[in-house]
Amino acid sequence: MTPPTSETAPAVDPGEPRMRRVPQQERSRRRVEAILDAAARIVVAEGVDAVGTRSIADLAGVPVASLYQYFADKDDILLALVERDMAEMDERVAAHVGALRRISLESLVEATISAFTQVYAERPAFVMIYLRGRTNQAIRDYGRDHNRKVAAMLFGFAADLGLTMPEVTVLIAELAVEMGDRLFQLAYEETLEGDPAIISEAVTLLTTYLQRYATPAGLTGIEV
């Protein structure tokens, strides 16, 4: 069997960005990144409630009018931050899964959680906006939709490798992803570094749940 790589491992389709106007030129893309980076710095330094379009524009060094070309309000900016960070998580999951040389349901859980926690460490604003907040309905909706996409991607990958019983449906993967999402909320509730004990238990809980639906190959793993 050909080993998966970061190019061939499963990936999530991020869908279309929800910005008012998608930047086409390099200068415009840099401006949008500066806006998002400024918002992230404010979130980490002062909290989500401190975010405002004026403060973001001032920190990013762009006119407020330029900011409104791409975003309707601060909630749009927060959603764009979440979208950007989740896209990075999807790429990291693909890379971690692609690096596996023995794939089982347990190793898939470990690789996925490891990828997520790495991105959380690099992007603390995401922890504060998504794991601790979700006061924005659009962010909640986007998160649920993303969870379903992640579940479908991982389920399809595992099923194609023969790791799950034939009668298993994507619902099982969706429930596992939702449980993982809630466990991450608990792990990062009081610390941006995440509680390692909760993260470790998350691996155990999700692996134990999924192994109920595993084939012998899903339990012992297959060499790739």
Image: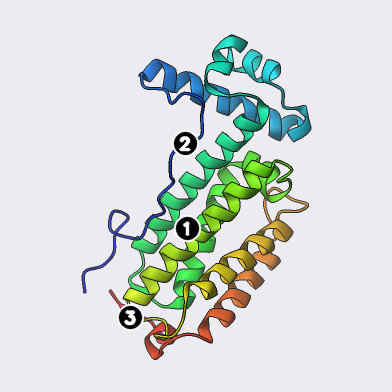
Which residue is tagged 3?
222
Taking the image as drawn, is residue 47 in sight? no
Image height check: is 179 above or below 138?
below
Residue displayed at 51% across by 34% down: 18
How does the figure colour the protein chain or chains?
Answer: rainbow
Q: Residues within 10 Å of mark 1 (few under 14, many from 20)?
A: some
Q: Amino acid at mark 1?
A: Lys
Q: Residue furthest left?
A: 2
Indicate the quadrant where residue 80 lies. Answer: top right
Q: Which of the two labelled residues, at mark 3 and mark 2, occupies the earlier sequence position?
A: 2
Left of 65 or right of it: where is 55?
A: right
x%, y% of residue 99?
35, 62
Which residue is tagged 1?
149
Q: Distance of mark 3 from mark 2, alpha carbons?
A: 37 Å
x%, y% of residue 153?
41, 63
Q: Residue furthest bottom?
A: 216
Residue displayed at 45% across by 70% down: 108
Q: Amino acid at mark 3?
A: Ile
x%, y% of residue 78?
63, 34
Q: Which of the two labelled residues, at mark 2 and mark 1, occupies the earlier sequence position?
A: 2
x%, y% of residue 28?
43, 18
Image height check: is 39 above or below 186?
above
Q: Distance of mark 2 from mark 1, alpha carbons?
A: 16 Å
Q: Which mark is residue 17?
A: 2
Indicate the quadrant where residue 93 lies. Answer: bottom left
**Quarter of the figure with the C terminus:** bottom left
Secondary element at tag 3: strand
Residues under numbered marks 2 and 1 in contact, where contact means CB atoms less than 8 Å apart: no
Left of 131 or right of it: where is 116?
A: left
Q: Distance of mark 1 from mark 3, alpha carbons?
A: 24 Å
Q: Residues within 10 Å of mark 3 (few under 14, many from 20)?
A: some
Q: Residues within 10 Å of mark 2 (few under 14, many from 20)?
A: few
